[in-house]
Image (cartoon, rainbow, N blue to C red):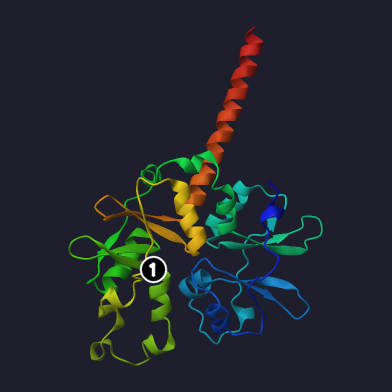
């Protein structure tokens, strides 16, 4: 399949190097999104990505876009989908620029959603969701009454981007995103002022997470097929799905990253099996 078939050329989120970071971020909704930076002459500069601008660097909102650029991997139209999927996961950005390999001309962008939507009919996605869950680490679950400080500590320890939130009975209440939490804490009105003594203020980290997690969460039973996760992600324009058991209790989260990682793994396994089979046939011919 040619990458040109899933290339997006129109309705690309674009901003100017002279815009403020706050304006660029206002047009994005998740840590994997990207706003593409072009000047008045339509010259490409790079992207604005929430993960690198907010989580990694903490730039103030009034910073000029030109001063907080991220330079993601360049995708060329002759790249395989496996390579593109790898670059999505390595860069943590799910919208990457596509260029002509000869002229270096900007052609458009490719998104992780377009890739998984294209590959969802492959036989590898007909397995049950619970089979993919076996390849994942157990989820990190937090009580809805836990403090922000507890949540931040769990994010730090486990390096997960999302925590499953439950009530006392273990029933799903929502999902807490690290990006959503950090974004709120980085808002000017929530930052600690210089010279302000922590002991004299109700610190944000002492608040419960019930004010920050998303309660609108889409779920699928663990016995559903994996391609149904992709359908839900594409149709609802979301980044992940919470997987539940027959008691409706959460057992894990399947993210776009998980789907890309699984695709890469299966493609490479298939390649090595073909190579091994070819070598085996060649050796058997030599013996005869």
- Front-most of residues 77 and 174: 174
What x and y, as percent, mark residue 93?
55, 63
Q: With respect to residue 45, does 229 lie above or below?
A: above
226 or 66: nearer the viewer = 226
Q: Which residue is mark 1?
A: 177
Q: Secondary structure at mark 1?
A: strand
In the rendered image, the residue lying farthest to the right is 103
Q: Is residue 49 visible?
A: yes
When the figure is inspected, residue 2 is found, relative to residue 218, above or below; the finding is above
Give the mark count. 1
Residue farthest toward the left in the current orientation of the protein: 168
**Would residue 215 appear left or right of 229 to someone viewing this image?**
left
- Where residue 199 appears, as percent x and y from the top left, is 23, 88
Which of the 4 quarters of the picture holds residue 268? Answer: top right
- Quadrant occupied by the C terminus: top right
- The residue drawn where x is 25% and y is 76% is 208
Give coordinates of residue 263: x percent, y percent.
Answer: 52, 45
Residue in view at x 25 percent, y 79 percent: 206
Q: Is residue 271 left or right of residue 207?
A: right
Instruction: Give the percent coordinates (x, y) of residue 45.
Output: 69, 72
- View extreme (top): residue: 288
Query: Residue sitting at 59 percent across and 19 percent down?
Result: 280
Would residue 258 be seen by someone viewing this image from the given angle? Answer: no
Quarter of the image for residue 97 reads bottom right
Left/right placement of residue 142 relative to residue 2 reads: left
Within-10-Å neighbours for mark 1: few <14, some 14–19, many 20+:
many
Q: Residue at x 56, y 82 (%)?
A: 21
């Amino acid at each position: 399949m040619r990458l040109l078939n899933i290339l997006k050329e129109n309705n690309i989120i674009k901003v100017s190097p002279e815009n403020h970071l706050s304006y660029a971020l206002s047009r994005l909704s998740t840590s994997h999104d990207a706003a593409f930076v072009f000047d008045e002459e339509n010259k490409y500069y790079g992207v604005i990505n929430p993960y690198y601008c907010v989580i990694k660097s903490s730039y103030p909102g009034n910073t000029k876009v030109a001063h907080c650029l991220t330079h993601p991997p360049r995708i060329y139209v002759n790249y395989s989908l496996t390579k593109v999927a790898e670059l999505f996961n390595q860069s943590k950005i799910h919208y990457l620029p596509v260029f002509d390999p000869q002229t270096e001309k900007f052609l458009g962008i490719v998104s992780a959603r377009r890739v998984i939507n294209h590959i969802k009919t492959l036989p590898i996605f007909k397995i049950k969701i619970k089979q993919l869950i076996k390849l994942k680490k157990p989820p990190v679950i937090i009580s809805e009454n836990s403090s922000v400080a507890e949540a931040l500590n769990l994010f730090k320890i486990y390096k997960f981007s999302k925590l499953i939130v439950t009530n006392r009975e273990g029933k799903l209440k929502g999902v807490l995103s690290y990006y959503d939490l950090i974004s709120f804490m980085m808002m000017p009105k929530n930052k600690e002022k210089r010279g302000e003594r922590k002991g004299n203020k109700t610190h944000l980290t002492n608040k419960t997470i019930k004010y920050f997690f998303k309660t609108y969460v889409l779920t699928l039973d663990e016995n559903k097929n994996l391609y149904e996760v992709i359908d839900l992600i594409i149709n609802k324009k979301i980044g992940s799905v919470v997987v539940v058991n027959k008691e409706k209790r959460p057992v894990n989260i399947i993210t776009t990253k998980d789907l890309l990682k699984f695709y890469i793994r299966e493609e490479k396994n298939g390649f090595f099996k073909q190579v091994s089979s070819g070598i085996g046939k060649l050796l058997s011919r030599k013996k005869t």
